[in-house]
Image (cartoon, rainbow, N blue to C red):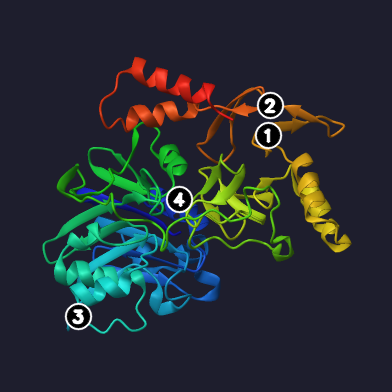
Amino acid sequence: MCGIFGVVNRHKRQLDKRAFITLGCANDARGGDACGVMIDGKVDRGTEKDDVYFQNWYPKSKVLKDTEKCYVALGHCRKASVGGVAADKAQPVTISDENGNLLFCLIHNGTIYNYEELAKKYIPGINIKNMTDSQIMAQIFFHSGYDVLKEYIGAGAFVIQDYRTNETFIFRGKSKNYKSSATTTEERPLYYVNTGKSIIFSSILSVLQGLFWGFDAYDIPSNILLKCTGENLYKIKEYDRSECTQSKSSYTKTSNTRNGLLSGYLDWHYSDYGYCAPKIDFDSGSGNYINGSTGEVLNGVVYVSDYGFISNYSTVYNKPYYFWNGIMLSGENAYRAMFDLLAQKLPEKTLLGISRRLSCNPVLINKKYYTFDADYKKIKFSEEYYYPLTDVVIYCDNGKLLADYCMDKIMKFNPVNLSIDTITKIINYVKSNIR
């Protein structure tokens, strides 16, 4: 994940450096490999070891220092995925004419997996060797337009400044997590505030709200190419991404999760999910926390933001959570205890039982949810429970998982417009026949 932020002014006016710099420093939580800005056609990037974080680099930026008034100011904090960490991979991505005049500028949060296929289709004459996915998407937009937005596999939140027409465009994708998903989800966060004179956007909501507390903050509408004038956002075209996915392959559950004997504990490690897992998720069928992008059961120390986004390092925004084969442990001490037990070569079933007792959440045992008292004795769980860091709620009756959680989904995706009474009858029938 990367962090993107910026200001688009209705007219050329004083750049609010307080807000712009604060948003840049906040989005460092989503970067760490490079940073950069584009202000009215002038570009500056922080790529050296001590300058990859915006908070360290911005006092040295000549472009930022020399700017007083501007129309457009874009900023990017990069977390490397495609192309790795290199100075020439930093953003903003730019395309200039033979005289060095900036023609096109893009900032991107997300990862595009089928970029080679898209390049062959849309820009066959361009050599894409050593390009990042973001650089390739910029070339496609520049040469072939925006219809590629309905075809990419992966995740995208894009902000584009096209100086050929002097227009600013914004796009935020929404697609299925994997092929087996029934519904689409937002690919990357992006929020904005409209002051009437400026539109200010950021990947992080809380800081945006804090800076502009007198104005409402909104989600950028998904799957719509928007033109941003600084006064408002205008719809250019809507793209259908219902058949696209955010992951390279379809989600499949780990084969040994159903019998409760989870393997792989010898691979215990400090997890690095920063590139492919946008969000943490909970699979109520197996009772496991999973990587929402790949379906992989979470193990070890995972750094997660308040919004549930997974990172590969700790910051003020990303806190450590401790997992044993999909079970969230009660803290660092429990984690270390499980870690120490690995050396004793205890049976896997024993280790799993211990991890359940050290969990901070209700755990699934033989298709029923339980908690454990101070003496580590099982207690049937019979309440409503919201799983931390996720949007999953379970409802239990005497330890048995019910189907109530499906109600909202059924109502939202009601294919034949069934009445509420009919839906209730269906759910009650399901409840009565759960085994």
CA distance separating discs 1 and 4: 39 Å
Tag 4's secondary structure?
Answer: helix
Residue receiving disc 4: 22
Q: Name the residue beneath numbered marker 2.
A: 381
Above/below status of 54 relative to 218? below
- Residue 296, given in percent of the width and then of the height, sits at 56, 56
Q: Which structural element holds mark 2?
A: loop
- Residue drawn where x is 56% and y is 41% of the image: 285
Secondary element under disc 1, as helix, strand or loop, is loop
Task: For marks 2 and 4, give the one nearer the viewer.
Answer: 2
Q: Look at the picture and state if 431 lies above or below 273.
A: above
Tell me the kind of residue under disc 4. Answer: Thr
> Which of disc 3 and disc 1 is earlier in sequence?
3
Q: Which residue is mark 3?
A: 124
Tag 2 near tag 1, CB within 8 Å: yes
Q: Are marks 2 and 3 in contact (CB under 8 Å)?
A: no
Mark 1 vs 4, N-terminal side: 4
